[in-house]
Image (cartoon, helix red, strand yellow):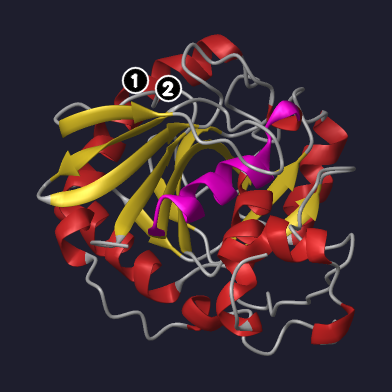
Amino acid sequence: MGEPVIGIIGGSGLYEMEGLTHLREERVPTPFGDPSDAYMLGRLEGRPVAFLARHGRGHRLLPSELNFRANIYGFKTLGVQWIISASAVGSMREAIRPADIVIPDQFFDRTKARASTFFGDGLVAHVSFADPVCPQLSDHLSRAGREAGATVHRGGTYLCIEGPQFSTRAESRIYRGWGVDVIGMTNLQEAKLSREAEICYATMALVTDYDVWHETEGDVSVEKVVAILHKNVATAKAIIRRVLPMIQGDRSCVCAHALKDAIITAPEAIAEAAKQRLWPLVGKYLGGHRP
């Protein structure tokens, strides 16, 4: 398959990566529909990368409109083994300030009806998700962030809400009581699907605001978020450039073999259509040739 590829998902404000060489666009059809946009393929800091604008170029897609399965499946078929996800979040803690960077290690799901698995329709698998992000990739991001001069918080819980509205004041206060650290609208499904695809995944959460719980800060608004976004995006790009050389080929983490003991369906009972659909994920465990 060639040299392993590093995937980059750009969130709000991060729609492209300058400095990509050998640049080409590729639209990747998947059994789950179309990804958010074409993947931008090239080399950055000497490493092969695949960049995807999560909401599409021009920010056309709501969080609930994102085809998470197509996005991650597309990365898998492109040979991606690591995904760095950048996204804007609100802070739920006084000590985590706007323009800080959080590298969360846990998620809490408050979404309602999003597709969060590749499996079903003839093939059942249950992956372990107790530790939902890659610790090695998260460590690299944390180190790169500090080297880039950012204020980095390693660890914490990302609460994923449906959106597109920001929280009510009552919701924000309750979430604070739960002990979460940041709040966003996109990363939970990416993390689940990346684990099923045996891709190392880590989030670089870019703090833009204090949600609506803070007594002395103004309420969250698009205008305030965008103002911080511009600074955050520049920081995110600097971190990505620094982290790429740190990512090497040896994957000793659980991400690389998450499906090894997760497939429950007996081999003889797996539907042929399911084998065909999920072959890039499960083929190495089923043996033989692709249907």
Q: Which residues are magenta?
A: 65-80
Taking the magenta stretch, the answer to whether it contains residue 139 is no
Query: Vertically, is 138 above or below 127?
Result: above
Residue 230, numbered circle: 1
Foreground pick, 1 / 17: 1
Mark 2 surroundings within 10 Å by alpha-carbon count, few (fewer than 14), some (14 through 19), many (20 or more): many
User: What residue appears at the point 84 percent right and 74 percent down from the top-left corner?
Assistant: 270
Say which quarter of the image contains residue 163: top right
Whether residue 69 is in magenta: the answer is yes
* Apparent side of residue 4 relative to residue 266 in the rendered image (left or right): left
Q: Quadrant of the C terminus?
A: bottom right
Q: Is residue 13 above or below residue 150?
A: above
In this rendering, the label closer to the viewer, 2 or 1: 2
Q: Earlier in the sequence, mark 2 or mark 1?
A: 2
Residue sitting nearer the eye, 61 or 74: 74
- Amino acid type at circle 1 is His
Q: Amino acid at mark 2?
A: Gly
